[in-house]
């Protein structure tokens, strides 16, 4: 009986320890610097690279370190700063998908757990070999829905409270509270975005003496991604294929 009790305690301690280690993997001090985006030739037709049937588990795809990805490719988290060709040259395109609605996106496994989704501009007028601008990226570790955030939004909570609901929010805290070597000043307001099971949630924060507080949000239950380049605006449905959805 004593042996059974000891084993039970060891299992509980291990779960707490390793769960904490996994969470701490996301807490990193970022160093943000100015970088020039590099353009590379696209030497293959986009359509020939699309794979809508394979899973991340069934094919050999190199995983991505989420911290390297954010610091190197998205120091300011802005769209149209980086392109598909640059991402392909550095870390490949993962599993490239295209939906019936015209969304074009890559899926990557992440070293710290979960998956990375990167969406590309995909206009009808673009040629198969044209490079694509990167519209948005999402880091997803588990299935969450809008109801998981509803109380936080209503109470204008702190960023720390959001992190307790969705650990991936830590990445945005790393980004906006990191060491900036850029010529650009640190913004007093910043945003984050979350790919949920029932839509896309965008959060807006304002910095204060305690860190940052939630001041606004935008909810897109139709998975609509706003194309921020107004001259090229077209509706963009970012709903992923069923094969890439999380399940509880």
Image (tube, helix red, strand yellow):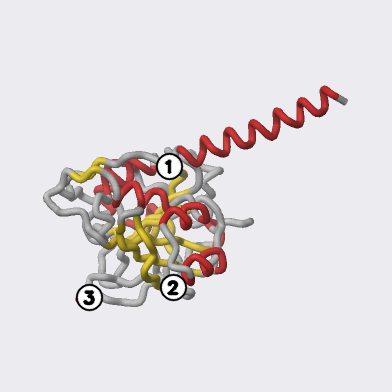
Name the residue nearer the viewer: 154 or 139: 154
Residue 63 left/right relative to 14: left
Name the residue nearer the viewer: 237 or 24: 24
Quarter location, residue 186 = bottom left
Identify the mark nearer the N-term, 3 or 2: 2
Residue 227, placed above or below residue 180:
below
Across and down, in percent, residue 170 comes to 41, 49
From mark 3 to mark 2, how far is it between C-alphas?
Answer: 20 Å
Name the residue nearer the viewer: 23 or 101: 23
Across and down, in percent, residue 151 comes to 53, 68
Across and down, in percent, residue 16 comes to 61, 37
Residue 105, placed above or below residue 150:
above
From mark 1 to mark 2, how far is it between C-alphas?
Answer: 25 Å
CB under 8 Å between discs 3 and 2: no
Identify the mark nearer the N-term, 1 or 2: 1
Quarter of the rendering occupied by the N terminus: top right
Query: Circle 2: is it few (<14), some (14-19), or many (20+) Cα within 10 Å?
Result: some
Residue 133, placed above or below residue 233:
above
- Mark 2 highlights which residue? 219
Q: Which mark is residue 26?
A: 1
Quarter of the rendering occupied by the C terminus: bottom right
- Mark 3 highlights which residue? 230
């Amino acid at each position: 009986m004593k042996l059974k009790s000891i084993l039970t305690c060891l299992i509980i301690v291990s779960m707490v320890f390793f769960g904490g280690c996994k969470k701490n993997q996301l807490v990193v001090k970022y160093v943000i610097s100015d970088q020039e985006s590099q353009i590379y030739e696209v030497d293959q037709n986009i359509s020939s690279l699309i794979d809508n049937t394979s899973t991340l588990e069934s094919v050999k795809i190199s995983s991505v370190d989420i911290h390297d990805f954010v610091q190197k490719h998205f120091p300011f988290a802005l769209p149209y700063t980086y392109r598909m060709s640059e991402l392909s040259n550095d870390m490949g395109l993962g599993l490239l998908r295209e939906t019936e609605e015209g969304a074009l996106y890559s899926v990557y496994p992440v070293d710290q757990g979960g998956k990375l989704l990167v969406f590309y501009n995909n206009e009808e007028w673009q040629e198969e070999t044209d490079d694509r601008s990167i519209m948005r990226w999402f880091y997803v570790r588990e299935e969450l829905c809008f109801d998981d955030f509803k109380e936080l939004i209503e109470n204008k909570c702190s960023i720390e409270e959001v992190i307790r609901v969705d650990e991936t929010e830590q990445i945005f805290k790393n980004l906006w509270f990191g060491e900036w070597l850029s010529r650009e000043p640190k913004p007093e307001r910043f945003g984050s975005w979350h790919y949920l099971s029932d839509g896309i949630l965008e959060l807006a924060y304002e910095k204060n003496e305690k860190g940052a507080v939630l001041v606004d949000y935008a909810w897109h239950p139709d998975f609509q991604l706003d194309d921020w380049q107004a001259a090229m605006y077209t509706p963009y449905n970012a709903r992923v294929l069923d094969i890439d959805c999380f399940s509880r």
